[in-house]
Amino acid sequence: MATEMLGGVFTALVTPFRPSPDRPDAIDWTALEALLEEQIAAGISGLVPCGTTGEATSLSGEEHAQVVRFVVERVGGRVPVVAGTGSNSTRRAVELTDAAREAGADAVLSVTPVLQPPATRRTRRALPCDRRRRTPRRALQYPFAHRARSDDR
């Protein structure tokens, strides 16, 4: 698949969660498998696990790799799997891309790191107060002036 063009409609999968005895946000593997089968039966051209709609930011690196591996294994080559590997951290994006390749994903989808929107004045004043309540040490807010633009200066 590496040299073939991808085409058609690809479903950006959600990552289903359910409470478990160990944690309130465990991945629901049964629901994920049902979602895969439903999409393939409907004639979808490919699947995108862990994309920006797949709760990728809520998954640990290990969970992310598990989801991609699970999808690749269950799909079994019936449709291409394009693993989402974007992150605000270049290091994490590289790690996710390596894991997707090792899992057998046909391609990866990596977004440009997101510029976090600047806080409003109200938020900038509230955050240090909240941090003081939570930590015994002083909290410093470090804005990057050239990246943190705001209309409320």
Image (tube, rainbow, N blue to C red):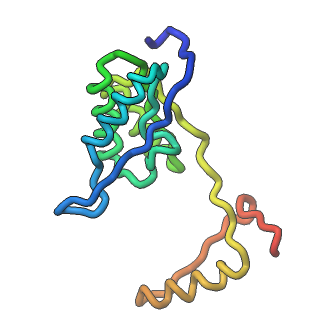
Image coordinates for residue 35, horizontal then vertical, percent: 36, 35
Seen in the image, is 151 located left or right of residue 135?
right
* Residue situated in front as seen by the camera: 19 or 95: 19
- Residue at the spot x=45%, y=38% of the render? 13
Image coordinates for residue 39, horizontal then vertical, percent: 42, 28
Q: Quadrant of the N terminus?
A: top left
Image coordinates for residue 43, horizontal then vertical, percent: 46, 19
- Residue at the spot x=65%, y=54% of the render? 115
- Residue at the spot x=18%, y=62% of the render? 22
Image coordinates for residue 105, horizontal then vertical, percent: 38, 24
Q: Is residue 144 above or below residue 121?
A: above
Q: Is residue 108 above or below residue 143?
A: above
* Residue situated in front as seen by the camera: 123 or 39: 39
Seen in the image, is 20 located left or right of residue 122?
left
When asked about the image quadrant of residue 142, the answer is bottom right
Q: Quadrant of the C terminus?
A: bottom right
